[in-house]
């Protein structure tokens, strides 16, 4: 009987022929008996499926899906590994992980979540980010991204899968729900992941997707507020995160574009009136409210 893998990596895919081979090959041949790679493809039409089929060790699920997080959920449900990780088609696993990890230790590890460092690569620039403590602050500030951790498979049964209502930031919702159950956590000081930033990157989007992400984030913050063990800390971090979103719009002169979204419009008004109460005159503040009428 074939032994179950220790780790399963799930990769959602759709029309990624230019990067899928690099992603697959980042898992070395000599560890493929211990590391399962599941690719959930939404019926690509550009040759991606043919590329994937050239790697017989990959478990391919090819069927229509409802976006990134629906595909991730399908992969999680199919996974057989003790721990589950996320691997985007744009990115690769770091060779350092495979050189330094002790498979026996991981196989017998009792912690719910394992945290690792990761590298951000932008052109010729490379930045290493050390593993963060997994807590509410780390989740809000993006210090413990979903691709930098491995999660015990049975924990998904406890807290549920990714919420497919959130098309871009459902990983934040998942991490907040995960943090709320106070999982046991162990950090390792070497890199698991290489996050490759580029204009068309699925991880690190921009443009229209940025607005959709911020809409998701604001709704996620509101929905998870009731789970917070410390309302004071949660509210402080929520204000900081939402403030950062509004400052982004103001810095890039995108307030009117953000105004097309009711969710963003509401937060912009709240933030501007609160932060700039003494800076703007009453007349200007009233004009802001009139512009953003309809909340």
Image: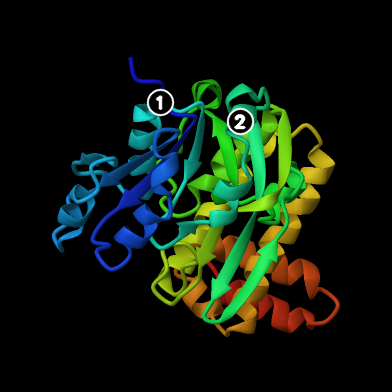
Q: Name the residue under label 1.
A: 80
Quadrant where the C terminus is found in the figure: bottom right
Q: Where is residue 9 in the image (x, y as percent from the top left)?
A: 43, 41
The answer to whether residue 232 is left or right of residue 9 is: right
The answer to whether residue 43 is left or right of residue 109 is: left
Residue at position x 63%, y 46% from top?
A: 100
Say if 4 sits above or below 239 in the image.
above
Which mark identifies residue 196?
none
Q: Quadrant of residue 242?
A: bottom right
| Depth order, front residue of 221/20 | 20
Q: Is residue 263 visible to us here?
A: no
Q: In which quarter of the image is residue 241?
A: bottom right
Q: Is residue 222 visible to us here?
A: yes
Q: Earlier in the sequence, mark 2 or mark 1?
A: 1
Residue at position x 15%, y 54% from top?
A: 50
State the CA–CA distance, disc 2 to disc 1.
Answer: 15 Å
Q: Name the residue under label 2.
A: 106
Quadrant where the N terminus is found in the figure: top left
């Amino acid at each position: 009987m074939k032994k179950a893998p220790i780790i399963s990596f799930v990769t959602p895919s759709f029309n990624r022929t230019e990067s899928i081979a690099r992603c697959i090959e980042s898992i070395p041949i000599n560890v493929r008996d211990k590391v399962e790679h599941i690719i959930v493809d939404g019926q690509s039409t550009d040759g991606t499926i043919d590329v994937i089929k050239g790697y017989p060790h990959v478990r391919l699920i090819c069927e229509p899906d409802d976006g990134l997080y629906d595909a991730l959920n399908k992969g999680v449900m199919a996974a057989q590994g003790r721990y589950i990780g996320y691997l985007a088609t744009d990115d690769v696993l770091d060779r350092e992980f495979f050189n330094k990890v002790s498979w026996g230790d991981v196989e017998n590890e009792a912690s719910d979540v394992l945290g690792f460092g990761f590298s951000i690569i932008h052109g010729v620039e490379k930045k290493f980010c050390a593993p963060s403590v997994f807590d509410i602050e780390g989740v809000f500030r993006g210090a413990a991204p979903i691709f930098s951790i491995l999660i015990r498979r049975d924990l998904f049964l406890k807290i549920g899968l990714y919420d497919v209502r959130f098309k871009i930031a459902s990983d934040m919702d998942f991490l907040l729900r995960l943090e709320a159950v106070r999982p046991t956590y162990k950090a390792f000081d070497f890199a698991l992941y290489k996050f490759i930033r580029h204009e068309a990157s699925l991880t690190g989007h921009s443009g229209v997707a940025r607005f959709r992400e911020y809409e998701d984030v604001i709704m996620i913050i509101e929905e998870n507020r009731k789970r917070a063990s410390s309302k004071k800390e949660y509210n402080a971090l929520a204000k900081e995160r939402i403030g950062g979103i509004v400052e982004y719009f103001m810095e890039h002169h995108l307030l009117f574009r953000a105004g097309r979204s009711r969710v963003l419009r509401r937060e912009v008004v709240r933030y501007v009136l609160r932060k700039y109460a003494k800076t703007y005159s009453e007349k200007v503040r009233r004009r802001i409210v009139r512009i953003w009428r309809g909340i």
